[in-house]
Image (cartoon, rainbow, N blue to C red):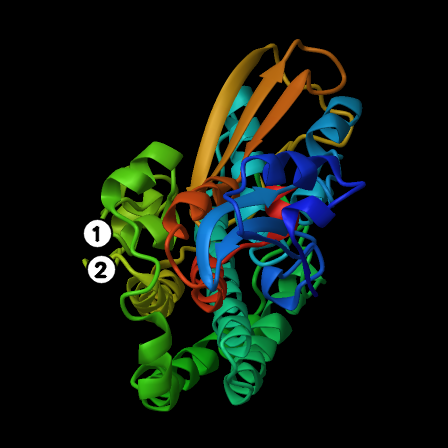
C-alpha cells in the first residue's frame, strides 16, 4: 500500500531518512511498495512528489535476495540447473538455456541438432506464456480486469503443453548439459500444432478488445518515453530497447542455436513510449508462433541428449565462459569461472530486468504518479530475477 509522510515526520528508516534530506521544501515522500500490487513482488520505490508530479524516484532492492550466485559455489554444474528455473518464473527456460549453454561452452560439449530445435520450441512457447502473463497483469494494473482472464486461458494451454516434456508448469528444470531431459512425444507435437492456429486467432481479438481501445491508448501513448541513449547508458535490452527503436535481438545478432536457419523478424518501434514497448511484445508473440511452426517442420530425427552427457558429479574443466540468450525481458547472460574443482568457482548472472529497472528513476522524473505505474508495467519487471 502507499504510505505517505512529510520529510520532518519520517523516523526509523535509514534509507528514507537519507532520501528525505535531499527533498525540496514542501515536497512529499511516498513509499510505493514494497508490497504494492503494481510492483509485482517486493520492490520498493521511494518517490518525492510535488503535488502529483514526481521529482525523484529511487528503486530499492534487497527484500527478496535469494543468493543464487552464492549457491552456485557449493553445487556442481548439473546440480545448479534447478536454481535457474527459479530466477525468473516468467521465462524459466531462458535461464535454463543460458546456464547450460555457458557450461557446454566451458566443457566443449556439442548439443545434438534435434535438441537445439526442442530448445527453441520450448523456449519460444515459454516466451509467449511470459508475454501473456505480462499482458494480463499490465492491463490489470491499469484498471482492466477482463483481459487477464483471456491471457491466463491461453497461457494455460501452453503450460499444459510444456508439462508433457518438462513435468513442470512454472519453474522448469528441463535443459541438461548436452541437450534436454526428454524428447517431444507425438501428443506434445500434436498439441503444439493445434495451439499455433488457436493463438493466431486470438491475437486479432486482443487487438480489437485492448490494443485499439481508446482507454488503453490514453494511458500508455506518449507515456514513459525512453530515448535510445538512455537504453544504452543503463544497458536496457529486450522489448524495452526495441521499443525505443534499437534493433538488438540476440536471436539475430548472436546467431546461437538454429535461429540462423529460421525466418522471423525482431520487431522494433520508433514510438519509444509505453505503447511502443507494448506493441513490440504483441508482435513478438506472433513471431514466436512462426518460429515454433518452422522448427516443427524442420526438426530432424535423432537424440536429444549427447552420448555420455555429464553426470551430477561431473567437474567443469578449468577456465571461464560466457553465454547469453534472448529472454522475454532481454539479454540473459551467464558468466562462469571454474578452477577445475568439484563446484563452480564463480557464477555471475546477468539479469535483464535489473538494467531495465535502473532507468526508471530517470524516465519517471516529471511524470505524474499515476503514470509511474504505467511506466513500471511497460518494463515487464520480474522482481525475483532482479533481486536474484
Residue 171 seen by the camera: yes
Assess disc 1: are there few (<14), some (14-19) or many (≥20) residues with their C-alpha within 10 Å of its C-alpha. Answer: many
Quarter of the figure that contains the N terminus: bottom right
Residue 269 circle label = 2
**Whole-percent x and y of residue 214?**
31, 86
The vertical placement of 1 against 232, above or below, is below
Instruction: Give residue 222's quadrant in the image.
Output: bottom left
SS category of the residue bearing label 1: loop
**Whole-percent x and y of residue 124?**
45, 60
**Residue shown at the point (37%, 60%) measured from the top left:** 295
247 vs 368, nearest the viewer: 368
Task: Residue under label 1, please give it.
Answer: 245
Which residue in the rendered view is the most extreme toward the left?
Answer: 270
Number of marks drawn: 2
**Whole-percent x and y of residue 192?**
49, 74
Assess disc 2: are there few (<14), some (14-19) or many (≥20) residues with their C-alpha within 10 Å of its C-alpha. Answer: many
Q: How far apart are marks 2 and 1 (CA)?
A: 5 Å
**Residue shown at the point (37%, 75%) measured from the top left:** 219
The vertical placement of 314 against 153, above or below, is above
Q: Do the residues labelled 2 and 1 touch (CB within 8 Å)?
A: yes
Quarter of the figure that contains the C terminus: top right
Q: Which of marks 2 and 1 is nearer the N terminus?
A: 1
Instruction: Give residue 63's quadrant in the image.
Output: top right
**Residue shown at the point (68%, 66%) measured from the top left:** 169
Amino acid at each position: 500500500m502507499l504510505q505517505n509522510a512529510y520529510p520532518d515526520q519520517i523516523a526509523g528508516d535509514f534509507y528514507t531518512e537519507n532520501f528525505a534530506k535531499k527533498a525540496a521544501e514542501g515536497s512529499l515522500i511516498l513509499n510505493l511498495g514494497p508490497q504494492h500490487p503494481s510492483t509485482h513482488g517486493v520492490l520498493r520505490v521511494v518517490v518525492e512528489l510535488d503535488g502529483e508530479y514526481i521529482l525523484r524516484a529511487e528503486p530499492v532492492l534487497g527484500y527478496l535476495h535469494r543468493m543464487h550466485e552464492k549457491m552456485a559455489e557449493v553445487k556442481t554444474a548439473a546440480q545448479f540447473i534447478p536454481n535457474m528455473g527459479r530466477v525468473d518464473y516468467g521465462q524459466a527456460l531462458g535461464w535454463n538455456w543460458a546456464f547450460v549453454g555457458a557450461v557446454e561452452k566451458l566443457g566443449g560439449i556439442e548439443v545434438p541438432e534435434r535438441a537445439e530445435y526442442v530448445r527453441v520450441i520450448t523456449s519460444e512457447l515459454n516466451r509467449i506464456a511470459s508475454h501473456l502473463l505480462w499482458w494480463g497483469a499490465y492491463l490489470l494494473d491499469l484498471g482492466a480486469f477482463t483481459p487477464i482472464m483471456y491471457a491466463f486461458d491461453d497461457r494455460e494451454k501452453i503450460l499444459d503443453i510444456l508439462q508433457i516434456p518438462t513435468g513442470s508448469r512454472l519453474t522448469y528444470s528441463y535443459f541438461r548439459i548436452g541437450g534436454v531431459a526428454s524428447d517431444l512425444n507425438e501428443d506434445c507435437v500434436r498439441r503444439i500444432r493445434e495451439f499455433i492456429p488457436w493463438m493466431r486467432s486470438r491475437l486479432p481479438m486482443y487487438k480489437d478488445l485492448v490494443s485499439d481501445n481508446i482507454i488503453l491508448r490514453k494511458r500508455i501513448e506518449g507515456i514513459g518515453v525512453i530515448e535510445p541513449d538512455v537504453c544504452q547508458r543503463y544497458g536496457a535490452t529486450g522489448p524495452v530497447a526495441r521499443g525505443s527503436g534499437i534493433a538488438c535481438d540476440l536471436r539475430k545478432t548472436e546467431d546461437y542455436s538454429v535461429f540462423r536457419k529460421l525466418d522471423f523478424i525482431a520487431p522494433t518501434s520508433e514510438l519509444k513510449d509505453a505503447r511502443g514497448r507494448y506493441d513490440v511484445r504483441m508482435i513478438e508473440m506472433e513471431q514466436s508462433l512462426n518460429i515454433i511452426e518452422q522448427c516443427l517442420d524442420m526438426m530432424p530425427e535423432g537424440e536429444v541428449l549427447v552420448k555420455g552427457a555429464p553426470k551430477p558429479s561431473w567437474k567443469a574443466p578449468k577456465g571461464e565462459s560466457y553465454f547469453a540468450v534472448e529472454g522475454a525481458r532481454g539479454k540473459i547472460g551467464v558468466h562462469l569461472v571454474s578452477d577445475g574443482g568439484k563446484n563452480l568457482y564463480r557464477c555471475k548472472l546477468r539479469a535483464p530486468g535489473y538494467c531495465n529497472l535502473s532507468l526508471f528513476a530517470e524516465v519517471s522524473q516529471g511524470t505524474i504518479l499515476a503514470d509511474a505505474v504505467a511506466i513500471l508495467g511497460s518494463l515487464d519487471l520480474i522482481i525475483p530475477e532482479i533481486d536474484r
